[in-house]
Image (cartoon, rainbow, N blue to C red):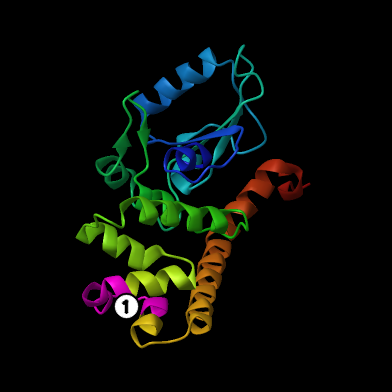
Amino acid sequence: MGGQACVVYGASEFTRVVEVAVLANAANLESLSAAMRDLRAEVIAVPPFDATMLDAGHAVHFRCHAPLVDGLRVDVMSRMRGVDEFARLWERRVTLASGIALLSLPDLVASKKTQRDKDWPMLRRLVEADYFAKSRTPTPGYIRFWLRECRTPALVSEVVTRHAQEAKLESRPAVLVAVRGGSEAAIATALREEEDAERAADLVYWAPLKSELERLRHPAKDARP
């Protein structure tokens, strides 16, 4: 998942971080530990590499020191806000010829709906790259994905115009505005409101997790004489 997956899907992003989603069971974590030892990787910052932390939604950060990957960071997560449980992600995965498994594009897009400014342009590019690659041979699944995830007013309007019957079945506010003949400015307002709601939900989701990280960083603050 993350920047490396974005490159594969045609929305280039330079990154020195490899982000991995894992099922946090004992066998997987042991295999991951062995891989990190091969990479001479150490956990940096907090939280510690622990199934409880992963199950809670934290990311565990490693820094590699083996030749050829010295300095590379590997981030590991098991749960993400707004994204299905790992078993569903695994069912929908895309497997490359190399054997590497990627989050499906809809799942990758869902994982990018965060409070971080840098994620929203990437989300937009991911959907646009998919649309321009497949718009001549659309399937019902592609059409639903574009209607639900396009993030520019002009493209929302285009998809609604080209696929009017499917658009009438969608409840997304930006699509409803376009179906009713609203202006691109009105569509843009609906898209902004949608983004603001996702950012706010992400802030709420991470608030207790950030508090837990602060307690891990500064355990003395909770100490009592």
Residue numbers of the magenta segment:
161-175
Q: Quadrant of residue 140?
A: bottom left
Q: Quadrant of residue 156?
A: bottom left
For this orientation, the residue located farthest to the right is 225
Q: Going by the image, does 75 lie left or right of 225?
A: left
Q: Is residue 112 visible to us here? A: no
Q: Quadrant of residue 220?
A: top right
Q: Position of residue 146 (x, y in %)?
A: 35, 63
Q: Going by the image, does 220 lie left or right of 135?
A: right
Q: Position of residue 16 (x, y in %)?
A: 61, 32
Q: Is residue 215 magenta?
A: no
Which residue is at 44% across, 57% downward? 128
Q: Position of residue 119 (x, y in %)?
A: 56, 54
For label 1, the crowd category at 10 Å Cα-Cα, with few meaning under 14, some 14 to 19 and many 20 or more, is few
Q: Going by the image, does 23 lie left or right of 119?
A: left
**Depth order, front residue of 182/222:** 182
Which three-letter amino acid code belongs to the residue tagged 1? Ser
Which residue is at 55% across, 59% downward? 120
Q: Is residue 125 visible to us here? A: yes
